[in-house]
Amino acid sequence: MTSSIRKAAADDAGALAALAAVTFPLACPPSASPDDIAAHLANTLSERHFRAYLADPDTTILVIDGNGGLRGYSLLVNRPAEDPDVVSALGIVPSVELSKCYVHPEHHGLGAAAELMHASLQAAAEAGARGVWLGVNSQNARALRFYEKSGFRKVGTKSFRLGSAVEHDFVLERAVP
């Protein structure tokens, strides 16, 4: 497979929404209802929302572009955390939030996620951050292993609303290279 990591462009919004529809459900706990997942996709990860993210100067979206389609993406937000639980947990500032980091399941285990993470950490450093933080569902063992392997450590917890349910996330952070 031939692929490259690049900054997303405005015309990637539709492909990003389609990729999110495949990847986001994989990060949800088994108890998450299909209706709640669908609502989150519609209210946060639609093409319209990706267009807004791409237009936001504080947001950077990186994509893995390969074989004629997007294979993964990360979304970084370069502004101070607002959630009081996150603010009190972070020890490295200024920091960038790694809001999303997903790879199509057909590319799991092939090193694509590690490459995307490396590029995301580089982008955070280039934006002037000293650290990167993220929230990950406490039941997402695969993601937790990946983030730990990527140098993140648990520093706190926060709540995350998924449709009608309240999920519990770990807050993880790491210094940028």
Image (tube, rainbow, N blue to C red):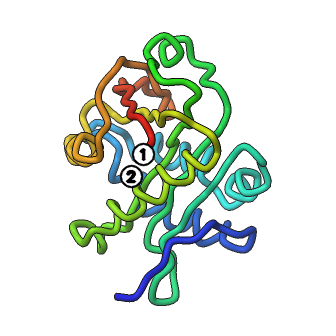
Q: Report the quarter where the N terminus lies.
A: bottom left
The single residue placed furthest to the front in the displayed view is 177
Where, by quadrant of the figure, is residue 83 drawn? top right
For the point 64% across and 56% down, the residue is 46
Q: Nearer the viewer, residue 55 or 44?
A: 55
> Mark 2 Cα within 10 Å, few/some/many (few <14, many 20+)?
some
Q: Amino acid at mark 2?
A: Pro
148 with respect to 9 (left or right): left
- Pick whichever of labels 2 and 1 is earlier in the sequence: 2
Q: Which residue is mark 1?
A: 177
Q: Which residue is mark 2?
A: 25
Q: How many marks?
A: 2
How far across and down, in percent of the image, does residue 108 sit?
26, 66
Label 1 SS: loop
For the point 40% across and 47% down, the residue is 34
For the point 72% across and 57% down, the residue is 54
For the point 63% across and 40% down, the residue is 128
Compared with 158, 114 (above or below) is below
Compared with 117, 97 (above or below) is above
How far across and down, in percent of the image, does residue 63 sit?
53, 67
| Distance of label 2 from label 1 (alpha carbons) | 30 Å
How far across and down, in percent of the image, does residue 74 sit?
51, 55
Q: Amino acid at mark 1?
A: Pro
